[in-house]
Amino acid sequence: MTTTAGCSSLPGDEYTVYVDPAFGDNYQTVVDSLHAWELVTPVKFHIKKKLALCSTGCGYEIGIKASTRAEIEAQAKQYGDHHHPLDVTAYDIQGVWSNVYLTYDVTKQAASHEIGHALGLHHTGYGTLMCATKDCASQHITCSDIAQYYELRPHLVNPTCW
Ligand SMILES: [Zn+2]
């Protein structure tokens, strides 16, 4: 089942994702992180190599911007709950649209974690990808993270983790 963009405030199953070409060599790191989520959940990303951020009312869009530390610090001040040492997600409606600010030297761990927030996921415990710091977070999407993806989307049945 696919959620139609526009009127819903439920987390989506399908997103248009704008990835900043300014990531350079790490453009592929970001794309690989998106594909990692597609491999383990039914989410579908339509990836566009373009810088585009949402201001308001975007339906199922994610903008991922290559950022300096200063830009990320400024965003983190505004969206304190989503502050990480290396990266930040600023979002208005969870799982509906997001702007993700990542450093130019982003790791797959950080990109995958922030994409998790863009999908509506919250922080979880030690050893999960969604653990709050890079030291406690897994390098990979874990069963617990997949379970959270499904919990947020009650119209889906989790076929893998229970
Ligand atoms: Zn986080």
Image (tube, grey):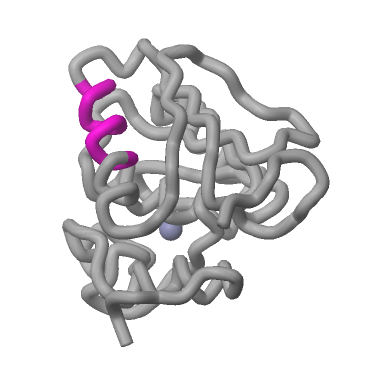
Please tell me which residue is depicted at 42% across the width and 47% down the height of the picture. Answer: 115
Q: Is residue 28 magenta?
A: yes
Please tell me which residue is depicted at 17% across the width and 57% down the height of the picture. Answer: 139
Please tell me which residue is depicted at 67% across the width and 28% down the height of the picture. Answer: 54
Q: Is residue 6 above or below residue 96?
A: above
Q: Is residue 61 above or below residue 134?
A: above
Please tell me which residue is depicted at 34% across the width and 43% down the height of the picture. Answer: 86
Q: Main secondary structure of the magenta part?
A: helix
Viewer can see residue 14: yes
In this view, the residue farthest toward the front is: 1
Q: Position of residue 41 (x, y in %)?
A: 36, 58
Q: Is residue 4 above or below residue 54?
A: below
Which sits in the foreground, 4 or 24? 4
Quadrant of residue 111 within the rendered picture: top left
Viewport quadrant of the C terminus: bottom left
Q: Quadrant of ligand 1?
A: bottom left
Q: Is residue 90 left or right of residue 162?
A: right
Which sits in the foreground, 119 or 65? 119
Q: Is residue 33 magenta?
A: yes
Viewer can see residue 70: no
Q: Is residue 98 above or below residue 51?
A: below
Q: Is residue 126 left or right of residue 2?
A: left
Specify the segment rendered in magenta. Answer: 26-34
Viewport quadrant of the N terminus: bottom right
Q: Position of residue 149 (x, y in %)?
A: 45, 66
Q: Position of residue 31 (x, y in %)?
A: 29, 31
Which sits in the foreground, 145 or 156? 156
Q: Position of residue 128 (x, y in %)?
A: 27, 71
